[in-house]
Amino acid sequence: MKLIITDLETLPCKVEGEYKLIKPAGDIRHCVGCFGCWVKTPGECVIRDGYQLTGRDLSRCGELILISRCVYGSVSPFVKNVLDRAISYIHPDFVIRQGEMHHKRRYDNRLNITACFYGDDITPAERSTAERLTAANSVNYDGSALVRFFKSPEELREVVL
Amino acid sequence: MTALINGSPKLSRSTSGTLLGILKEHMGGGFLETALHGPEPGDGCIEALAGAGAWVFAFPLYVDGVPSHLLSCLCKLQSLAGEKRPRVYAIVNCGFYEGEQNRLALSVMENFCMRAGCRWCGGVGTGGGGAISMLPRVPGEKGPLGPVERALRELGENISSGAAQDNRYVTVAVPRIMYKLAGQMGWRKMIKANGGRAGDLGKRMS
C-alpha cells in the first residue's frame, strides 16, 4: 500500500494501486513533545484529533509519498505536522546507523519515500535543503528516498505515482 | 534590542528554555524574551519582534527539521522579517548525540532569511538534548555541559557585537554509549511511571 500525505485539497496526480490519502481535513493539532506516543500509548499519538494513527499507517505501507509546497526547503507546515505527529512509527531506543545515532525500528516494513515538492520559485538553496532533508528522513526511517520538483500542483497531472 | 524566542512547543521546562537561560548569561542587557509555542505568533510576540534588531530562535529538532508549529510561525513572520530586516540566529537541539544532526534545521532557517530578505547570522546545533536540562553545570565551562556552554557563550558574544558566525555543532561531554544507555533507561522509567511495561515500548499497532 502507498501512503500519500499532501497539503493539497485534491490529489493532483494519478496513483497506481492501493493507497491511503492524508490531506487537510479539520483542525490538526501540533506535536507538543510529550513522548506520549512512546511511553503512554505506544504506537499511537495521545492527541485524538483524527491524525493519531499515522505512525501505524506508515507501518502498513511500502511507499510514503509526500506532495507538498516547498517551504524554505522543508515540506509545508501541514505535511510537517503530520510527520511530526507520526514518530510512533519508530521505537524510542537508539541505534547507530551510518555513523550517527537514530531510532530503532518498531516495524519491519521498509519505507521508500517519494517527495514531490512544488513551487514556482524554489531557490537552489531550498532545493538542496529539500533533497538533503528527504535523504535524512529516509535514514531515520531506515528506508530510501527519491525527490522530485514541480513548478505547480498542475504539473503533477501527468504524473503517475 | 535582541529578541530571545523560545520556539519549543512545551510551555515550560523545555531544553530550548534551558539553552536560552545559558545564553542570557552572556548577553548583558538589551534583550527581551518571547515565545512561539503554537502555530500562530501572538500579538505580544509580533510586537516584541517588530522592535528587535536581532531575533534568536531556540527550538528542538523534529523529524530532521523545524517543528511544524514553528514553520507555520515563520511563514507568518516572513513579511515582518522582510520589513524589519533583523539579524537572525538559531539554537537547535536534538535528542540524538550528534549536534550535526541539526544542520538541516539551520539550513531551513537560513533559507527563511534568504526568502524574507533579512540577515542569517548563524547558529548552534547541539546534540544530547535529552540530557541538557538534567546535567550539572560545572564552573569554568567544564563538566558535561562545557562544550554547549562554550558554544553559547561565543554565540552570545557574537549576538551582542552584531557579528555573524558559522554554524557550530556541539554535544554534551558524555561518551555516546553512556548517553545512549541513559536515554534507554529513561524510556523504561517513563513507561513504567505511566503504568506500562518496558516491553510495551516496542508495541506494534495492528
Image (cartoon, coloured by chain):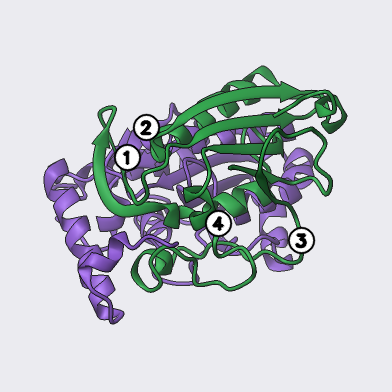
Chain colours: A green, B purple
Q: Which amino acid does label 3 sit on?
A: Ala
Residue annotated with mark 2: B168
Which label is found at residue B107? Answer: none
CA distance for labels 4 and 2: 34 Å
SS for tag 3?
Answer: loop
Q: Residue B151 carries which label?
A: 1
Q: Mark 4 lies on which chain?
A: A
Q: What residue type is labelled 4?
A: Thr
Q: Find numbered disc 1 in the image and state the secondary structure of the residue it sits on.
A: helix
Query: Same chain for marks 1 and 4?
Result: no
Judge the density around disc 3: few (<14), some (14-19), many (≥20) Cα neighbours within 10 Å: few
In the picture of the structure, the residue carrying the numbered disc 4 is A54
Q: Residue, x 37% and y 49% (percent of image)?
A: A107
Q: In this figure, which residue is indicated by the disc labeled 3?
A: A25
Q: What element carries label 4?
A: helix
Q: Which of marks 1 and 2 is in front?
A: 2
